[in-house]
C-alpha cells in the first residue's frame, strides 16, 4: 500500500457517513468502502510521481532530525510520518499525532519524538530519532488541515565510515579508509581528502552483504609514517534536491613511532632464466589482484650487493624506476589484471637475482628470478680472430664452451664465466661457419649463442663490449686495425664476420648490436622453470695445465 493510501485511510476513518443520494440505488452501508477503494486507486497512481523535497546524510548510530514545517495557526489536525526503506515498495507508519494526543506506528525508531513538543501550534513537525545502519530510505511527512493534506518527502542516507586497522596504526603499515552509503548511486559523490585538503585516489567498493546492493568507496595509505597523521575528511555531494551543498565527516589517523608493522610473507618458487644480450626478457612476478604497491629488488650479478630498482604505489600514484628505460611494467594496469610482470632489456651487466614483492594490506607475496646473461663478441688482431663468450650470474653454471659445426673446439677459459677460441685471419673456408657458445646449467638445461664467421671485410671490425675496454686498449686496437688493413690489402684477401644466435637471435658486428625474435625468445624463456633445489657453483681459474682444462670444456653440449 502506498504512503498516500495509508494517510487517506486514516483520514477517511474520521469522516462522517453522508446519506446516499436519492438518485443512486447504492445502499448506505456500502458508501464508505467504495469511497476508500476510490481513494486507494487515486493514492497509488499519484504517489509514484512524488518528488523528493530534501536529502539528509548522517553517520550510523548518530541522532538525526528529519525536517518538516507547516505554517502555524492553520489548525493542523493530524501529522503522519511514513517510511519506505531502500529497495522496498511499501510504506510503514513511523510516527503519528493528532489534536487529542500522540500515538506511534509499527516502524518506531530509537528515541523517536517530535523536535518541538508544541508542534501543532508552532508548525514544526520535524522528527528526531537515533539513526541506525538500516534506517535509510524515504520518509514522508503528511499534515492534515481540515480537508487539505500536504506532504514533503525526505531522503535519509546513512553513511558508514571506517579506518583499518583501528586505533593507533604501526609505522610502514597500510591504512584503509572506507565509506559506505545506503542510497544507490550516491557513491559517485563520495570522496576522501587528506589533512592538507588534497583529494585522495579512491576506488568503488561493493558490499554484497548490504541490503539493496549498497556500494561505497575505498582509499588506502600504504607505508604510512608520521607525516600521514591528521584528520581525513569524507565528503558527500548530494545526488538530488538538497539545501545543503555538501556533507563533511572526519576521521582521525594516528601513527605509532615505536610499534613496527608486521607482514605475512608468502614465498613463491625461484625461477632461472637465461637470455642473450641484447634482447628483451619478461620477468614474471606474483599474480595478485588488487595489490597496493610493488617493489623490485636487484642483486647485482656475481655479488652480494642488493638495490631497490623499482617502486610503484598505485594509491599515491608514485613510481620510482632507477633502471629506466631498460625496465618497465609489462601491463598498464597491473592491479586490475593482477599481473605484475616486468619487461627487461638485457645488456651486459643486467644479470643477477631479481626479487619481486607485491603488498596487499598486511600480506606480502614474494618471488625471485635468477637471470644469467650470455654475451658474445670478437676481437680482431693482425693474424687472428678471437671469439669471446661471457656469462654473468654464474650461480647455476656447470659448463661453458665453444663448438664449431657440432664439434668441440679449443676453448680457453680466460676468467670465471668467460671462454674464448682463436681462428686464423683470414679464416680458411674449412673454418668458416657457425660457432656456438654452449651454456649448461646445473640442472642440465643448455642454452646457445651462435656467431657466424664468413669471409667479408666486416671481420675487421672489433665488437668488444665498451665496458671491457680502457683508453689504452682502445688505442692499441686502432693500431692493430690499421696493421690488419694493410696486411689484407697486400694479400688482396677479404674476410667477413657475421654473428647470429640460435633460435632466431643474431649478432651484427656492423652495428655492434643484436636483434632478436621476441616471440621465440619468450617461448624459450617460459619453457624452462628451474627446480626447487639448486646447486651453486663458481668457476675460478687455477694453476692446472690449460690443455687439461680445454679437454673438459670440449664435453660441453656433447
Image (cartoon, rainbow, N blue to C red):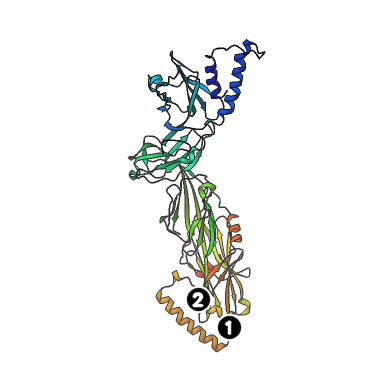
Answer left or right for 296 relative to 225.
Answer: right
Q: Residue furthest right?
A: 25
Q: Is residue 395 visible?
A: no
Q: Is residue 379 visible?
A: yes
Picture coordinates of residue 39, whole percent (x, y): 58, 21
For mark 2, does the 10 Å Cα neighbourhood hold few (<14), some (14 to 19), or many (20 or more) residues? many
| Rendered position, 130 above or below 326 | above
- Mark 1 — residue? 494
- Quadrant in the rendering for residue 177: top left
Point 58% across, 85% down: residue? 493
- Mark 2 — residue? 462
Picture coordinates of residue 459, whole percent (x, y): 55, 78
Picture coordinates of residue 142, whole percent (x, y): 48, 23
Observer-nearest of 45 and 83: 45
Observer-nearest of 381 and 466: 466
Q: Secondary structure at mark 1?
A: loop
| Rendered position, 267 above or below 32 | below
Answer left or right for 388 relative to 161.
Answer: right
Q: Closer to the N terminus: mark 2 or mark 1?
A: 2
Observer-nearest of 20 and 130: 20
- Quadrant in the rendering for residue 255: top left
Q: Quadrant of the C terminus?
A: bottom right
| Rendered position, 329 above or below 458 | above
Amino acid at each position: 500500500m502506498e504512503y498516500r493510501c495509508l494517510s487517506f485511510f486514516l483520514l477517511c476513518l474520521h469522516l462522517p457517513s453522508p446519506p446516499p443520494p436519492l438518485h443512486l440505488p447504492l445502499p448506505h452501508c456500502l458508501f464508505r468502502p467504495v469511497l476508500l477503494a476510490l481513494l486507494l486507486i487515486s493514492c497509488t497512481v499519484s504517489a509514484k510521481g512524488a518528488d523528493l523535497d530534501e536529502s539528509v546524510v548522517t553517520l550510523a548510530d548518530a541522532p538525526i532530525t528529519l525536517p518538516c514545517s507547516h505554517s502555524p495557526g492553520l489548525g493542523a489536525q493530524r501529522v503522519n510520518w511514513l517510511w519506505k526503506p531502500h529497495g522496498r515498495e511499501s510504506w510503514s507508519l513511523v510516527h503519528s499525532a493528532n489534536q487529542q494526543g500522540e500515538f506511534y506506528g509499527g516502524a518506531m525508531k530509537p528515541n523517536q519524538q517530535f523536535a518541538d513538543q508544541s508542534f501543532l501550534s508552532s508548525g514544526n513537525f520535524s522528527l528526531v530519532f537515533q539513526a541506525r545502519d538500516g534506517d535509510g530510505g524515504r520518509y514522508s511527512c503528511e499534515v492534515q488541515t481540515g480537508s487539505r493534506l500536504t506532504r514533503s518527502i525526505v531522503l535519509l542516507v546513512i553513511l558508514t565510515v571506517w579506518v583499518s586497522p583501528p586505533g593507533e596504526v604501526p609505522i610502514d603499515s597500510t591504512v584503509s579508509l572506507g565509506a559506505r552509503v545506503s542510497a544507490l548511486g550516491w557513491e559517485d559523490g563520495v570522496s576522501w581528502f587528506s589533512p592538507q585538503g588534497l583529494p585522495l585516489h579512491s576506488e568503488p567498493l561493493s558490499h554484497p552483504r548490504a541490503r539493496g546492493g549498497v556500494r561505497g568507496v575505498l582509499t588506502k595509505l600504504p607505508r604510512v609514517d608520521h607525516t600521514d597523521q591528521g584528520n581525513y575528511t569524507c565528503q558527500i555531494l548530494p545526488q538530488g534536491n538538497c539545501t545543503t551543498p555538501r556533507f563533511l565527516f572526519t576521521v582521525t589517523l594516528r601513527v605509532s613511532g615505536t610499534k613496527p608493522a608486521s607482514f605475512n610473507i608468502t614465498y613463491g618458487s625461484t625461477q632461472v632464466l637465461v637470455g642473450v644480450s641484447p634482447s628483451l626478457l619478461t620477468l614474471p612476478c606474483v599474480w595478485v589482484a588488487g595489490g597496493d604497491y610493488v617493489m623490485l629488488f636487484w642483486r647485482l650479478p656475481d655479488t652480494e650487493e642488493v638495490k631497490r630498482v623499482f617502486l610503484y604505489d598505485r594509491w599515491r600514484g608514485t613510481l620510482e624506476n632507477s633502471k629506466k628505460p631498460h625496465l618497465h611494467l609489462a601491463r598498464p594496469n597491473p592491479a586490475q589484471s593482477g599481473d605484475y610482470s616486468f619487461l627487461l632489456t638485457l645488456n651486459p651487466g643486467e644479470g643477477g637475482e631479481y626479487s619481486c614483492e607485491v603488498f596487499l594490506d598486511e600480506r606480502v607475496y614474494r618471488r625471485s628470478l635468477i637471470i644469467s646473461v650470455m654475451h658474445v663478441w670478437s676481437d680482431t688482431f693482425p693474424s687472428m680472430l678471437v671469439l669471446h663468450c661471457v656469462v654473468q650470474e654464474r650461480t647455476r653454471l656447470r659448463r661453458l664452451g665453444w663448438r664449431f659445426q657440432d664439434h668441440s673446439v679449443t676453448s680457453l677459459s680466460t676468467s670465471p664465466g668467460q671462454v674464448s677460441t682463436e681462428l686464423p685471419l683470414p679464416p680458411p673456408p674449412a673454418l668458416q661457419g657457425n660457432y656456438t657458445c654452449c651454456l649448461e646449467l646445473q640442472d642440465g638445461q643448455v642454452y646457445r649463442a651462435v656467431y657466424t664467421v664468413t669471409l667479408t671485410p666486416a671481420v675487421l671490425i672489433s665488437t668488444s663490449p665498451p665496458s671491457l675496454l680502457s683508453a689504452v686498449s682502445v688505442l692499441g686496437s686502432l693500431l692493430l686495425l690499421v696493421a690488419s688493413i694493410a696486411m689484407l690489402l697486400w694479400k688482396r684477401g677479404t674476410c667477413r664476420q657475421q654473428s647470429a644466435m640460435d633460435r632466431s637471435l643474431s649478432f651484427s658486428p656492423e652495428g655492434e648490436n643484436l636483434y632478436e625474435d621476441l616471440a621465440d625468445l619468450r617461448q624459450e624463456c617460459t619453457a624452462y622453470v628451474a627446480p626447487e633445489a639448486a646447486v651453486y657453483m663458481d668457476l675460478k681459474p687455477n694453476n692446472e695445465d690449460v690443455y687439461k682444462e680445454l679437454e673438459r670444456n670440449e664435453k660441453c653440449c656433447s
